[in-house]
Each structure stands twice: as structure tokens, then as C-alpha cells.
Image: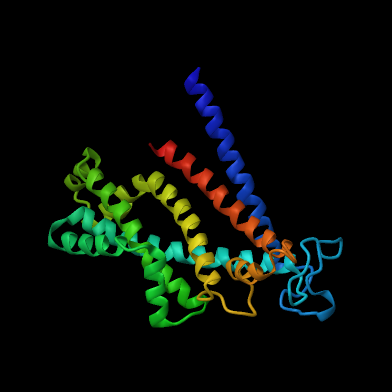
């Protein structure tokens, strides 16, 4: 009975997570093709207007429609986060597979480098990279992508160390399968549950990281909208126009909460 209750609770939280992410994705997908207004169009007559039928989320300090900017900004944040996670996933998977399967001196060197990178806060490392390569959304993708590599490499390496000792790998070797076929055809598919969990957690962290960097004016640059940048601009208007911060803030909260619920359920299923 207790296990059944836990299962029902887990399914409910998974459904809630999927619904929350779906709501955000609806804004993102629609924003790719249509927004109520031009997100960068300014109007002196519409400065700091409260939510209304014509502007459901209100307008900002430059008279720009917040709903339109949230739709486009959420799409920008999602795109940066997805590309960031893809860079970390692909590079980290290759590094983790090679080090976990072969071991030896290369494994020791790469893992020590991994340990060095993970010993620093990710935002601090991102700041260092951005200070070297410059600001902007393309540079932030490169900086965050590099930072995400060690976490994926560590996860894949630990799985490969376990999997390579199992019978199906030994049978594949006896049948004459090459190392790369064993790694990427036989072992890699068996790491899918833990990788799916890592991807959802990675998306969660990437969204927060991108929002944080844009909040510090190091990510997406004006006039392009970004959720983090919008929060940064809204902090001076919290008392006069609180709706300016509420819309991008709620979008970030819904996204992070949704991915957190999904990742927890995937992680629980994998365990």
C-alpha cells in the first residue's frame, strides 16, 4: 500500500512537471512564429502600463509589450540552454566513454582536470570564460557548454566502468566486436536512463545559468529580450511596476520547477 501511494505521488509530480514545461514550451513555440507586438518596439505613451486586455502582462519602462518580450525571451533562453546541454552531452559522453572504458593515464589526467573544473562554482567559471571571449549569446553558449562537459563526462564514465564488466560486453568481445562498437552500440544505450536524468537536470541548470549571466548583463545583449535581462531591468521598477518582474520571474520558476519534477521522477525510475 505504501509503495502504491509513493507510485501515485510520483506519477502526479511527473504529470505536474510535464504540464509546467508544456505551458512554457507553448509560449516558446508560439513566440517563434507570432507575438502580439514587436518585442523591441518602444512607445513613450505606453511606459509602465499595468496588465490590460491589450497588454495582458503590461508594458515595461520603454513601453514595450512584456508578453511579447517574455515569449521571445523564453525562446532565446531555451535555445541557449538546449545548445549548451548538447555541447556538454556530446563532448562529455565521448570523454566519459573513452576514459571509463580504457582507464589508464588518460583517465587519470582527464578526471583530475574534471575535478579541478568542478571544484569552482559554474557561474564563476562562466564569468572567467566570458571575460576572455566576450559577452553575447553565442559566447555564453560556448562558455556554458564547456562548463557542462565535466558533469556529463563524470556520469558517463561511472556508468561505463560498471557496464564494461558485465557479461554482454564480454560476449561482444568474444564475437569480435571492436572497442568503438562495444562502447557506442552496446554500452551507451544502457546508460540512457541516467543520461536522461542528467539531461533534464542539465537543462534546469543551463536555464538558471543563462538567466544569471544575462541578469549580470553578460549574456544576451539589448535589444534582444532574455528572461534574466528582463529581471535585471525590472529591479528598479519593483514598486512602481511589479508586473515587469513578475512575468519573466514566473516563467523561470515554472520552467525550473517543471524540469526539477521531471528529473526527479526519471532519476527515481532509473534507480
Residue 178 seen? no
The foreground one among 231 and 143 is: 231
Residue 58 seen? yes
Q: Position of residue 45 (x, y in %)?
A: 85, 78
The residue located at (39%, 60%) in the rendering is: 89
How many numbered dots are placed on residues in this image?
0
Q: Residue furthest top?
A: 1
The residue located at (48%, 80%) in the rendering is: 135
Q: Is residue 239 left or right of residue 49?
A: left
Asked if 156 appears above or below 271 in the picture, the reply is: below
The residue located at (18%, 47%) in the rendering is: 173
Q: Position of residue 214 (x, y in %)?
A: 54, 71
Q: Quadrant of the C terminus?
A: top left
Q: Position of residue 259 (x, y in %)?
A: 53, 49
Q: Is residue 254 left or right of residue 269?
A: right
The foreground one among 78 and 161 is: 78
Q: Quadrant of residue 123?
A: bottom left
What's the coloring here?
A: rainbow
Q: Position of residue 251 (x, y in %)?
A: 64, 57
Q: Is residue 136 left or right of residue 105?
A: right
Q: Residue furthest front?
A: 239
Q: Residue furthest left?
A: 105
The foreground one among 173 and 167 is: 167
Amino acid at each position: 500500500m505504501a509503495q502504491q501511494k509513493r507510485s501515485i505521488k510520483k506519477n502526479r509530480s511527473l504529470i505536474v512537471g510535464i504540464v509546467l514545461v508544456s505551458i512554457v514550451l507553448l509560449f516558446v513555440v508560439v513566440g517563434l512564429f507570432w507575438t502580439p507586438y514587436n518585442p523591441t518596439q518602444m512607445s513613450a505613451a505606453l511606459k509602465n502600463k499595468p496588465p490590460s486586455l491589450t497588454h495582458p502582462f503590461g508594458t515595461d519602462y520603454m513601453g514595450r509589450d512584456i508578453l511579447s518580450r517574455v515569449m521571445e525571451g523564453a525562446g532565446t533562453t531555451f535555445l541557449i540552454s538546449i545548445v549548451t546541454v548538447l555541447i556538454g552531452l556530446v563532448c562529455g559522453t565521448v570523454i566519459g566513454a573513452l576514459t571509463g572504458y580504457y582507464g589508464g593515464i588518460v583517465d587519470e589526467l582527464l578526471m583530475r582536470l574534471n575535478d579541478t573544473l568542478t571544484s569552482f562554482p559554474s557561474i564563476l567559471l562562466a564569468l572567467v570564460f566570458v571575460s576572455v571571449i566576450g559577452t553575447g549569446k553565442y559566447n555564453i553558449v560556448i562558455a556554458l557548454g564547456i562548463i557542462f562537459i565535466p558533469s556529463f563526462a563524470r556520469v558517463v564514465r561511472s556508468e561505463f566502468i560498471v557496464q564494461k564488466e558485465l557479461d554482454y560486453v564480454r560476449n561482444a568481445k568474444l564475437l569480435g566486436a571492436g572497442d568503438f562498437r562495444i562502447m557506442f552500440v552496446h554500452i551507451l544505450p544502457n546508460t540512457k536512463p541516467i543520461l536522461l536524468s542528467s539531461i533534464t537536470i542539465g537543462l534546469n541548470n543551463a536555464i538558471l545559468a543563462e538567466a544569471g549571466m544575462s541578469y549580470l548583463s553578460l549574456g544576451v545583449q539589448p535589444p534582444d529580450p532574455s528572461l534574466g535581462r528582463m529581471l535585471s531591468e525590472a529591479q528598479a521598477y519593483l514598486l512602481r511596476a511589479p508586473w515587469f518582474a513578475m512575468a519573466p520571474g514566473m516563467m523561470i520558476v515554472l520552467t525550473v520547477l517543471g524540469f526539477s519534477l521531471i528529473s526527479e521522477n526519471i532519476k527515481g525510475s532509473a534507480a
